[in-house]
Image (cartoon, rainbow, N blue to C red):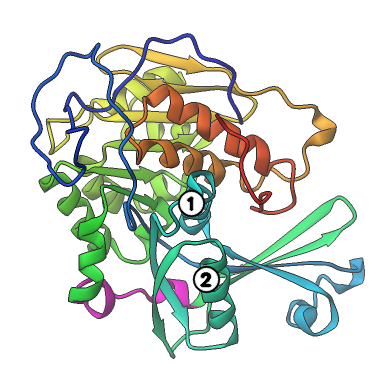
Amino acid sequence: MASGEPRAKKLRLTDEKKEKKTPEKKTPEKTPESSRKAPTKLGPNSLFGMGNPLLDISAVVDKDFLEKFEEIVKKFKVEYHAGGATQNSIKIAQWMIQDPHKVCTFFGCIGEDKFGEILKQKADEAHVDAYYYEQTEEPTGTCAACITGDNRSLVANLAAANCYKKDKHLDLKENWKLVEKAKVYYIAGFFLTVSLESILKVAKHASENNKLFTLNLSAPFISQFFKDALMEVMPYVDVLFGNEMEAATFSKEQGFQTEDIEEIAKKAEALPKVNKKRPRIVVFTQGKDGTIMTKGGDKVETFPVLKIDQKDIVDTNGAGDAFVGGFLSELVQDKELEQCVKAGHYAANVIIRRAGCTFPEKPDFH
């Protein structure tokens, strides 16, 4: 999942022209498609994410140990990382951006416990401005990766991540101010199982203020078993992410009557949308095959991925999260959409060369 140099004409998500001199002044006016926008200067809390925070715990273990999960942190040398789908993408976006720190905000629920404290520390080390809702009913969610040779066994326990409450966190004045500061919003579909009302509040704010709201289909079961919740949010979605399997399931559940991924993208793009000022963009990844993206109307562009030798692939689990993170890192800077895809492919290419959703100190992306 990474990109070659696409030959497409420059793409843009909106036809609005932003003032180049002072980012604070927002007086949108129509401008021709051929006009080029200067990248926006980033400030704190420009990119907002909300989802299920998990503390990723990885350890090299013996084969006979896999059934004794609780003993991992006692017996083995472990590594901790801030994880969970949305938090991964937000973390990678911040890594791609580098400076300033805390461009990215993240909301989610954790427990008042040791793992919660470690998660806060890891988010801080990733320079993400994480504001967690802390509660005592459930422990901090975890995802343990037990590594035996070339094999990884993942054991996830959502726990506190399932306990996010809109009225106890998102609605608080000081927290909502952080939402208002953002210009781009990203939520993985997994969060539809936790707090639909929170997603809708953020999505409606984005739509009413002509900001960008982005959503990920995340997994086939979301389109199947949380279809009603998904379709409540869909009218507010400016950018829809997914992979080929998620796209196929979405098509089936929506009665699109096609298995062609380009046709699915077109039909998803054409679904009802509240904010008519922005066309919906649909981005579907296909692993080693090209990523497709709608361009408005009947136009679909395919972007080839960066080539990688099979022996250099260590772990593909975080590839989708990484792609979105790279994409968002450019989108929040008002870069051309083809550049967003290129950044997504770069980030995914870095992540699949490493164990877990981890990355080197600095990106080498231009």
- 295, above or below 273, in the image: above
Q: CA distance from mark 1 to mark 2?
A: 24 Å
List x then y, in percent, for residue 234: 25, 42
Q: Residue at x 33, y 26 (%)?
A: 256
- 126, above or below 321, in the image: below
Q: Residue at x 20, y 58 (%)?
A: 180
Observer able to see residue 15: yes
What mark, if any, has residue 118 been given in the picture? none
Q: Residue at x 78, y 78 (%)?
A: 72
- At label 1, counting other C-alpha atoms closer than 10 Å, the crowd grade (few under 14, some 14-19, many 20 or more) is many
Q: In the rendered image, which quarter is residue 68 located in?
A: bottom right
Query: Which residue is identified by label 1?
Result: 94
Query: Which mark sits nearer the N-terminus, 1 or 2?
Result: 1
Which mark is in front, 1 or 2?
1
Query: Which residue is identified by label 2?
Result: 158
List x then y, in percent, for residue 257: 36, 23
Label 1 residue SS: helix
